[in-house]
């Protein structure tokens, strides 16, 4: 398991979490600058009030393929969206689940598990599927900020369910048909 959360970002978020009052006026700018000390692009906008609901929604949107390109919701969910890399490929999964490992008033740690089917990689013609089944597990840390809970520096590439992957505009047609056959009816 890898914990991908920079120490500086965690310290910044915990320091910002000390300000428990709802920010308003100049407090908004002060809190945003306290969090955004490393040019991380923190979005000073009210977010989730519960870590479980934030992670659940993030994983659903990820599986649906929403994070294969820039996404405002993802930026607002992340503690430091500017730290996220750009991805050249994606992971195709059949399932995901999460389990809370520990939590206190300002941080929550989860184990996220995926059943990987393979990889969606790019060539000059677009995306193609490469089978590579395995179980993946990763640890993610969420932190409370004055604007609600945020996901730490989790640079996990997008994990798409088959229904999300078939939406890729440049997916090889034979792979699109394969993925459509793996998509449950109604998705």
Image (cartoon, grey):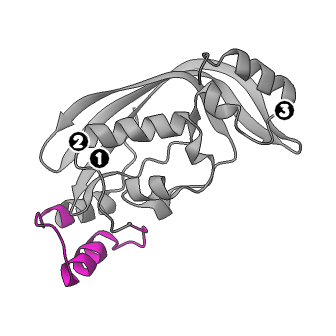
Relative to 116, is 141 above or below? Answer: below
Image coords of residue 145 (percent x, y): 23, 60
The percent position of residue 83, horizontal first and vertical second, equals 48, 60
User: Label 3: how many residues lie within 10 Å, few (<14), some (14-19) or many (20+)?
Assistant: some
**Residue 91 placement (x, y as % from top left):** 61, 32
Q: Is residue 179 left or right of residue 80?
A: right
Q: Which mark is residue 28?
A: none
Contact (Cβ within 8 Å) of mark 3 with mark 1 = no
State left or right for residue 8 relative to residue 2. left
Outermost front residue: 186
In-image side of 91 versus 32 (left or right):
right
The first of marks 3 and 2 along the sequence is: 2
Res. 134 image quadrant: top right
Q: Compute the Cα span from label 3 to label 1.
A: 36 Å
Marking on residue 142: 1
Q: Which residues are magenta?
A: 16-42
Determine the secondary structure under disc 2.
strand
Mark closest to the chain's N terminus, 3 or 1: 1
Query: What residue is shown with label 3?
Result: 172
| Foreground: disc 3 or disc 1 | 3
* Displayed quadrant of residue 185: top right
Residue farthest toward the right in the current orientation of the protein: 125
Q: Which residue is mark 2?
A: 108
Indicate the secondary structure of the residue bearing disc 1: strand
Label 2 and label 1: CA atoms lie apart by: 5 Å
- Image quarter of residue 17: bottom left
């Amino acid at each position: 398991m890898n914990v991908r959360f920079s120490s500086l970002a965690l310290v910044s978020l915990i320091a910002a979490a000390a300000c428990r009052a709802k920010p308003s006026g100049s407090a908004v700018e002060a809190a945003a600058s306290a969090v955004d000390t490393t040019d991380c692009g923190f979005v000073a906008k009210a977010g989730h009030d519960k870590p479980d609901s934030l992670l659940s929604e993030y994983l659903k949107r990820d599986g649906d393929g929403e994070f294969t390109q820039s996404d405002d919701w993802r930026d607002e969910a992340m503690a430091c969206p500017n730290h996220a890399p750009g991805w050249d490929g994606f992971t195709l999964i059949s399932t995901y689940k999460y389990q809370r490992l520990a939590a206190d008033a300002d941080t929550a740690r989860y184990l996220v598990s995926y059943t990987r089917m393979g990889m969606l990689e790019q060539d000059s013609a677009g995306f193609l599927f490469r089978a590579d089944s395995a179980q993946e597990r990763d640890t993610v840390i969420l932190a409370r900020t004055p604007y609600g809970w945020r996901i730490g520096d989790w640079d996990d590439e997008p994990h798409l369910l088959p229904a999300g992957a078939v939406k890729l505009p440049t997916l090889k047609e034979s792979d699109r048909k394969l993925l459509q056959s793996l998509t449950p009816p109604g998705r």
